Image (cartoon, rainbow, N blue to C red):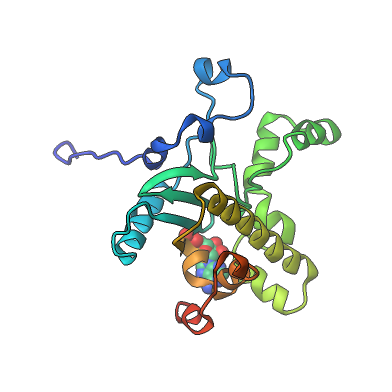
Amino acid sequence: MPNVPNVAVFDTAFHQTMSETHFLFPVPHEDYTEHHLRKYGFHGTSHYYVSKEAIKLLGNKKNSKVIVCHLGNGSSVCAVKDGKSLNTTMGLTPLGGLMMGTRSGDIDAGVIPYLMDRKGMDTHQIIDYLNKKSGILGVSGISSDLREVIKASKDGDIRSKITIEMLCNRIKKYLCSYAGLMGGVDAICFTAGIGENSDLIREKVCNGLEFMGIELDADKNKIREK
Ligand code: AMP
């Protein structure tokens, strides 16, 4: 298609406003300067659009503090301060941060050599394990699709219950940490497959955050439920 213009939209671009204090990993500095080892973040187009719309709903508030929870098969949370990405949970690769459909998200890095040693895994196998066999699928042993795990949990499956608790705890951990980094939060946005459609996950994530002034309207939360 020689006459069709090509447009490249980088999912990392929105996060280029992160400062070194937020994008550096706590490892020897020369690996950043020589090998570009740093947090890049992903889901930028989603975080940008959703936070922009939220800021409009806030009446174009100055110095707004918005947290976007993009919860789909891949998931990330982003702290958006005054319309700019301050920090986000994905890192050099999309494996960082939250527990996802099949990705582990953040884990103790010591797990990697431990598993390689114990199970004789090579680099490709461990990456496949953390990217494709972990997360909701790995913990539940049922599916990467949260709808199936929620159904199993309602039917009494203990591992599915644990999966849902782990998922929500991890979202809550970043939500509170980003509220702390920004010195408060004006709006929490939920988007992507789980964020948009699961009233259960929204409720569990917001539950217990009354100390931060967060009160979920149970009726409104039910409006978008599939
Ligand atoms: P996405 O990657 O944004 O398309 O999101 C896909 C994921 O959303 C699926 O894997 C499902 O786990 C999840 N999802 C969609 N609808 C629901 C729902 N009603 N409850 C829980 N999870 C849902």
On screen, residue 219 versus residue 164, left or right, reads: left
Q: Nearer the viewer, residue 112 or 189?
A: 189
Residue 3 shows in this picture: yes
Residue lying farthest to the left in this orientation: 3
Residue 146 quadrant: bottom right
Taking the spot 31% from the left edge, 41% from the top edge, the residue there is 9
Residue 92 shows in this picture: no
Query: Residue 27: where, in percent of width, then height?
Result: 64, 24
Taking the spot 77% from the left edge, 77% from the top edge, the residue there is 156
On screen, residue 20 versus residue 151, left or right, reads: left
Instruction: In the rendered view, tell whether residue 187 sits above or below residue 29.
Output: below
Query: Residue 124: where, in percent of width, then height?
Result: 66, 32
Instruction: In the rendered view, tell whether residue 40 sits above or below residue 203.
Output: above
Taking the spot 62% from the left edge, 44% from the top edge, the residue there is 131
Image quadrant in which the N terminus is located: top left
Number of numbered discs: 0
On screen, residue 75 versus residue 63, left or right, reads: right
Query: Residue 30: where, in percent of width, then height?
Result: 57, 15
Instruction: In the rendered view, tell whether residue 154 sits above or below residue 71.
Output: below
Q: Nearer the viewer, residue 117 or 84?
A: 84
Residue lying farthest to the right in this orientation: 118
Taking the spot 60% from the left edge, 46% from the top edge, the residue there is 97
